Image: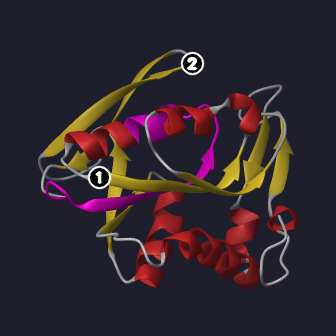
Amino acid sequence: MILRNGFDLKTYIRTIPDYPKPGILFRDITTLLADLHGFRAAVDELCWPFLKDRIDFVAGIEARGFILGGAVAHTLGRGFIPIRKKGKLPYKTIGQDYTLEYGVDTIEVHEDAMKPGDHILLIDDLIATGGTAAAATDLIRKSGGVVVAAAFVIDLPELKGADILRNKGVKVHTLVEFEGH
């Protein structure tokens, strides 16, 4: 995707073959984050569609979603809510289980992170199978929040994660697509 400011974000994203296991093409955004122009362009483009929407908080999924979500929250002038793996938050939490390839995992949010009716923009670096993002959507809804949209730098459309979120009634915004997984 060539952005308004002329940046092709794909050129800032490194592909690492066979990580974390053989056959996987890992899309590494650390190279994007390290480039001041690429990072700024990505944050601006994640924010752009939501400038006029009611957003009370930005929620970011651990770990790269913290980096992007924090920057988006700052840019939009909103607070940030971390969605973390089980046992990582220090206060009382609400959890949501989700299925992994070989088992079940849990993500959590502080029970007082949002009030019923708060409008939340969900951010992460990549949408693949959609399991974590769908669980985060369910967690926000369980906490009383309204998911305004979910935004990602990268979509892997073959894995259909964005479709899973859309089927849950979530507007999905992505900046670039990569074929394969």
Q: Which residues are magenta?
A: 114-136
Residue 108 appearing in the image: no
Of the two numbered discs 1 and 2 in the rendering, the one whose residue sits closer to the viewer: 1
What's under tag 2, amino acid-wise? Glu
Above or below — where is 43 with respect to 65?
below
Name which quarter of the figure residue 4 lies in.
Answer: bottom right
Q: Position of residue 145 (x, y in %)?
A: 24, 52
What's under tag 1, amino acid-wise? Val
Q: Report the residue marked by disc 2.
A: 101
First reached walking from the N terminus: tag 1 or tag 2:
2
Label ID, residue 146: 1
Q: Position of residue 135 (x, y in %)?
A: 39, 35
- As helix, strand or loop, the secondary structure at mark 2 comes to loop
The question of residue 166 being in magenta is answered with no
- The residue depicted at 71 percent of the width and 84 percent of the height is 36
- As helix, strand or loop, the secondary structure at mark 1 comes to strand
Image quadrant in which the N terminus is located: bottom right
- The residue depicted at 22 percent of the width and 61 percent of the height is 118
Q: Position of residue 6 (x, y in %)?
A: 85, 81
